[in-house]
Image (spheres, rainbow, N blue to C red):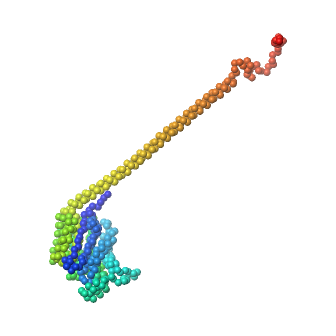
Amino acid sequence: MKENIPQLKWRCIGESVKGASHVRSGLPNQDAIRWFPESGIGLPLILAVSDGHGSAKSFRSDRGSRFAVETAIKVIQEFFLSSQSSDINFSALKDAAQRLLPPRLVNEWRKAVNKDLGLSENDEEKLTNKPNFTDEEKQILVDKDGEAAWQAVENNYFLAYGATVLAVLVTEFFIVYIQLGDGDILEVDSKGNTTRPLERDPNLIANETTSLCMNKAWNEFQVHLEQYPKGTPKQMPALILVSTDGYSNSFSTDEGFFKIGQDYRQMFKSNLTEEVRQKLEGFLQETSEKGSGDDITLGMIKRLETDDRDYLTDRVEDLDRKVILVEESNMRQQENISVFESKVNDLKQQQYTIQKAVYWGFIWGFSLIMGTFLISNAFSSYLFFRLNKVEKMLNELKEPKSGEEGQSQPLNSPSNTSSPPPETTPSQVPTPIPP
């Protein structure tokens, strides 16, 4: 059994914290994060992050961001399900992803929002019923931003759920970067150099951002695919960071923000991945308190390097896996041997049964033959003696007894010939005996 162990060298971890200002105001965390698989181990890996808008009109943006990451994971899985091969047409895949992925993601997000609003679609695909906004939600918005703000929400229900979305897919052969709205995706190579795989959107000015709630939002997406030849995993990024804008806004310069790439990479050198994950919440809370005060979400995809703390652990785990595979193989072989021995024993038993049957068949046959032989001999002897006796009787009938020899003449003897009897003379006549 051959196991693709290199795929297990990738890890995904992340954390999302409520911003310091939201803690003070009682607002919920409007960010969301999700990855696939849930274990965060092995390829392909998908990481999605979303930032719900903080404006009063987006009063359900915490749900909108959750729908965004769930939709991104689902759509990316379905879209790239058949693209896990080294012989794919990368150019065609890239073109299809850039054209089809954004509208599919937006439409699926809108379906999730409509379902949450209690809306349904009829055969003409026109919404029926009314959204389930509460009077309290309406009153809070009107009190804060006026009737015009509520009218804007009624004209575009999706505005209440407004959110950004950033996603990364890592496979053996390529990496996909997707972004709509503000936030940051950073690549860190094996030398610690940190770069952006996507250029900054020039439409993002001040606090304005593109969003899933916009009309034709699919036109605002950035989708970038990076191909990696098979057998060149070391050319892939050592670390990928995906964060909401609350993180970068906590730094006064890009240089200061970019430094987190090298800092986190170094952290993996002296800490296990699980230890880094446990420290993330504290780091992000401190950053929000000292920086933007906004919600901060950070997801990280890490490729294992030989000087990482996890490397030795993974090597031991690899050996353990191999030992388990060998033990399982030995167990299967032992089971096969047991089955073989059982079959041999069955054959031996069958052989013994056949030999026994042959033996008793031989004995029975021999006994039958001997019995037949003895009976035949006895009958032959009986016939022999009977024939002798009959022959003797016949011989006795043929030979006359001694007292009857003068009287008994054979019919063909000379005395019985047809010659006339001799003439008797008077002297030859017997003299009668006187009384």
Identify the image quadrant of residue 257.
Answer: bottom left
- Residue 429, image x, y percentages: 82, 13
Vertical relation: 55 (above or below) 302: below
User: Number of numbered discs present?
Assistant: 0
> What is the residue that sits farthest to the bottom in this orientation?
147
Vertical relation: 19 (above or below) 404: below
Identify the image quadrant of residue 281.
Answer: bottom left
Residue depicted at x 59% and y 30%: 381
Residue depicted at x 33% and y 82%: 132
The quadrant of the rendering that contains the N terminus is: bottom left
Residue depicted at x 25% and y 87%: 143
- Residue 250, image x, y percentages: 17, 76
- Residue 12, image x, y percentages: 25, 68
Q: Nearer the viewer, residue 136 or 386?
A: 136
Relative side of 397 to 432, left or right: left
Q: Nearer the viewer, residue 224 or 389?
A: 389
The quadrant of the rendering that contains the C terminus is: top right
Residue 95 visible to the viewer: no
Vertical relation: 397 (above or below) 9: above
Q: Nearer the viewer, residue 122 or 303?
A: 122
Residue 59 visible to the viewer: yes
> What is the residue that sits farthest to the right in this orientation?
426
Identify the image quadrant of residue 416.
Answer: top right
